[in-house]
Amino acid sequence: MTVYFIGAGPGAPDLITVRGLRLIERCPVCLYAGSLVPEEIVKAAPQDALVKDTAPMHLDEIIADMVAAHDRGEDVARVHSGDPSIYGATAEQMRRLDALDIPYDVVPGVPAFAATAARLKTELTLPEIAQTVIVTRTGMKASSMPEFETLEILGKSRATLAIHLSIRNLPHIRETLTPYYGEDCPVVIAYRATWPDELFIRTSLKDMQAAVREAKITRTALVMVGKVFGEVEFRDSDLYNSGFSHVLRNVGKKKKVASDG
């Protein structure tokens, strides 16, 4: 018996991995985060499977269902949105399973920031513009940030930022990042990327709060900040540069061999 933590992806049912879908199709138990996992994915569970939405459940109840499945010798598909490694509250479940000696495995999924970049047809790392992507959130009443991971510190990098769980904290984001990025820095507010009702707002640090207020977005949105979202000039990378030599395309060596011949 194994508990499979499965990333369902950002929203579109066909963005789940083949491995994740095949596990859901055969597991006798399916525990899913109902608020963010598409219904179509859950419908792939076997007709006689135990399928439960864990949104109204607390941790002890979820673990109790896993223990019961373990006692019956039944595999469990534990389906989370996005990728289980990012803000999925999976570590606390795994810790409980470790203590109970219940085996588990993890199947990755497409994270929201990657889905957003895909829908925008944007590369998050452009030569000499940005070569770092930081996935983070801001401190709220329910949970603070570690001392050295505050937006004040991360903002100094001027990297591309994917800020989760912070759509109600826009004034803090604007005030904190403006000294490093400038008030006109491009911002994308991604609401439910890849879902049928997805919405992308292209704005700036200065204007993002007004834009979000006008769109009446209060949850399930990702704030992405960085120069890569603007109309910027950047040079071609060396990866496909005809004059650049690397282990799979050693231009200099080939020229030397040809010359020696």
Image (spheres, rainbow, N blue to C red):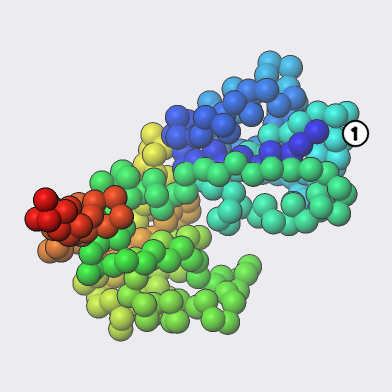
Q: Who's the residue at 68% across and 19% down the image? A: 46
Q: Who's the residue at 39% across and 64% down the image? A: 133
Q: Is residue 163 above or below residue 104?
A: below
> Mark 1 belongs to which amino acid?
Asp
Q: Could you tell me residue 198's position as x and y percent?
A: 37, 42
Is 83 left or right of 58, judged from the image as shown?
A: left
Is 127 left or right of 118, judged from the image as shown?
A: left
Is 123 left or right of 27, judged from the image as shown?
A: left
Q: Who's the residue at 64% across and 44% down the image? A: 106
Relative depth, front residue between 188 and 252: 252
Is 233 left or right of 72, judged from the image as shown?
A: left
Relative depth, front residue between 138 and 132: 132
Give the residue number, with chain letter if any, for mark 1. 71
Q: Secondary structure at mark 1?
A: helix
Residue 229 visible in the picture: no
Q: Is residue 70 above or below residue 144?
A: above
Q: Is residue 70 above or below residue 233?
A: above
Q: Could you tell me residue 122's position as x and y percent?
A: 26, 51
Image-quadrant location for residue 7: top right
